[in-house]
Amino acid sequence: MTGTQRHTEPIDVHLIALRDGPAGPEVLLSRRAGDVYAAGCWHLVSGHLDGPHEDVVTALIREAREETGVVIDPSDVRAAVTVHHRSPGGASRTGHFFEVRRWKGEPGIVRLDVCDAMDWAPLHALPAQLVAYCRAGLDAYTAGARLAVHFQLPGDRIAFDPGADRLRLVPDVTDQASGARPDAAVVEFAERAVGRIARWTDTSWAREESRVWRVHGVQGGTWYVKVHQNERFHGREVRGLRTWAPELGAAAPRLVVADETLRAVVLTALPGRPLHGTVLAPGRERAVFQRIGALARRIHQSSPPQTAPAGSGPAVAKARRHLAGARSHLLPGDEEFVRELVRQAKDLPPLEWVETHGDFQLRNILCAPYTADETDNRDVFVAVIDLERSEPGPAVRDLVRLSDAWASRPDLFEAFLAGYGRSLTAAEEARLVIDAALDSVSGIAYGAAHGDPELIERGRRTLARLRAEHRRALSSTGDAT
């Protein structure tokens, strides 16, 4: 022992009596009254062990009978969570919280000297005047924790204060925090923004270095937490979320909070699922692509167009490096095709710059309702996510990766243009060919360096399509020949 006194403290028990309510689970609460601690505050039915002869389950059953009149069978008692608590006055105790869903009798006030009200409260909407210790136990229980620490500080209120939430969940050996949750700093950042989080689900793309989690709050609500792989991606996503994304309303996530040091953001969740890999009926596909075109138009028209900066043409400067990295995976004739496009690129007329998403492809486009049936356009909702490559550029930038989706399906391209509200100019069509080819080579080089055969195959497939559609290189006027 390092101290002068062995640690001793009371043990208490708390009843989480649950029933099904119209809005979800409800928990039984009693309001403390008289000459007791926390008079006037709501609390769970609870009490201390009578002595060393009494175990915690026996004590819970006794307290429930003495305070509410109900009879609980020991076989219906379930361990919920244990909380090590310290009050604002400095006294500590250990509380064992138990879940019970079945009992005999109707709960009611038995001792008017210590309780003046009893009621059911939705588990996701607990009353404000709830004892902080009790609230800590319920929040830990809702979060699925098995052990929690709740050490209050001198001056803290007895009733729960969101600004002085002292609850700390202790992961157990099976806790998903070891693999699915981010580090403690990101967890704290997210919970400051949206409150206590009950569940973290890793939804990151396998090939990306950015990390994304879908989180569910203890008191309800769903958000996404994202940690970017570098400052550039973080800056671009935050800028897009603060500039053009609000113009899309429900069709883009809303930025809740951002932290530049952590390179982290908290975003609202959107309905629907990504379109990547889906199989839809032709009529449904056309309706979806028309909505995608309308979505692209809203992004590109979210601010007035600007004159392109000098030297802002296709990314030909990187072509040599990407070709070197992709060369072993290119088909005969691919490299010559790309080099000819690079030579032609310098003669293309500049295109106006608009706001662009930058990674506009089916995996970043959500659709709802998610069905394969034929449908009228009015039934289709699409939204866009993942803005970390968002920055001003030519509008055709957003068609580079999307164009694979309508390969050999001119009806889908026509549907997109119908939603977009106009056709592409000759200069835009030429730029699309060049940018798609350069993007394919870049993808092949990246896939080769990171062992991603899917990315390599997608790039090879796109190059083969482009070569078939444009058997000769572009003319100096920007027209395909």
Image (tube, rainbow, N blue to C red):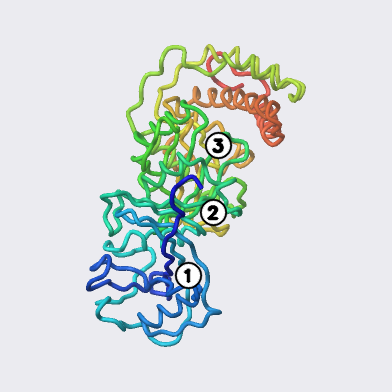
Question: Where residue 312 appears, x then y in whole percent?
Answer: 46, 16
- Mark 1 belongs to which amino acid? Phe
Between residues 107 and 94, which one lies in front from this camera angle? Answer: 94
Between residues 246 and 382, which one lies in front from this camera angle? Answer: 246
Marks 1,3: beta carbons within 8 A: no
What residue is rendered at 53% in x and 56% in y?
370
Q: Mark 2 vs mark 3: which is more N-terminal?
A: 2
Q: Nearer the viewer, mark 2 or mark 3?
A: 3
Q: Mark 2 vs mark 1: which is more N-terminal?
A: 1
- The quarter holding residue 14 reads bottom left
Q: Mark 1 vs mark 3: which is more N-terminal?
A: 1
What residue sits right under mark 1 in the picture?
Answer: 98
Between residues 456 and 423, which one lies in front from this camera angle? Answer: 456
Q: Secondary structure at mark 2?
A: helix
What residue sits right under mark 3 in the picture?
Answer: 402
Between residues 274 and 151, which one lies in front from this camera angle? Answer: 151
Say which quadrant the C terminus sits in. Answer: top right
Residue 18 visible in the displayed image: no
Please determine whether, in this image, residue 351 is positioned above or below residue 219. Answer: above
What residue sits right under mark 2 in the picture?
Answer: 284
- Mark 2 belongs to which amino acid? Arg
- The outermost residue toward the bottom is 105
Q: Secondary structure at mark 3?
A: helix
In 3D space, how far apart are the residues under numbered discs 2 and 1 (Cα atoms)? Answer: 50 Å
What residue is rendered at 56% in x and 79% in y?
75
Disc ID at residue 282? none
